[in-house]
Amino acid sequence: MLHLLWVGLGGLLGSVARYGVGRGVEAALPGAALPWATLLVNVAGCLAIGMLAGAWGGAGEPGGSGARVFWMAGVLGGFTTFSALGLEVARFLEAGAPGRAALMLALNVGLGVPAACAGLWLTRPA
């Protein structure tokens, strides 16, 4: 039960941080052709989760320590926006912009997965 509270508190903080990043990017890049905030948080979240998993010596599956579930399931679960990515890609497709949809998918996967690998590599002992 305590883990659920840690996940919930982390999720609250991660979601608020995600909202702040989104507002900041919107203010910095008004009318941008792509949703850059989503890319930014997904890549940053992938890097962070890779670093945490590497530092803690595991994949970070739920059910681990309180700190692990707080940061990985809670904070990063609330911060990253894969569900938002799905909606944005669907909207590009509905708007007849399959090229933008493909670009967003390619950028999120093409940068997010290597960022997670980099996070693991950066935190593993030599």
Image (tube, rainbow, N blue to C red):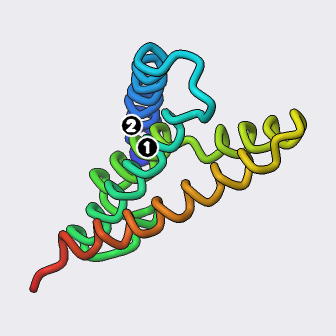
Identify the residue at horizontal 55%, vertical 55% (top origin): 107
SS label for mark 1: helix
Q: Does the rendering let one see residue 4?
A: no
Q: Residue 80: percent from the left, percent from the top?
A: 49, 43
Q: Is residue 117 left or right of residue 122?
A: right
Which residue is disc 2 drawn over?
10
Q: Residue 22: percent from the left, percent from the top?
A: 48, 24
Residue most toward the left? Answer: 126
Q: Hey, what amino acid is under mark 1? A: Gly
Name the mark on residue 74: 1
**Location of the C terminus (image quadrant):** bottom left
Q: Does the rendering let one see residue 52?
A: yes
Q: Residue 115: percent from the left, percent from the top?
A: 37, 63
Instruction: In this rendered view, identify the residue nearer to me: 122 or 6.
Output: 122
Q: Are marks 1 and 2 in contact (CB under 8 Å)?
A: yes
Q: Residue 43: percent from the left, percent from the top?
A: 43, 52
Q: Residue 114, located in which quarter of the rendered image? A: bottom left
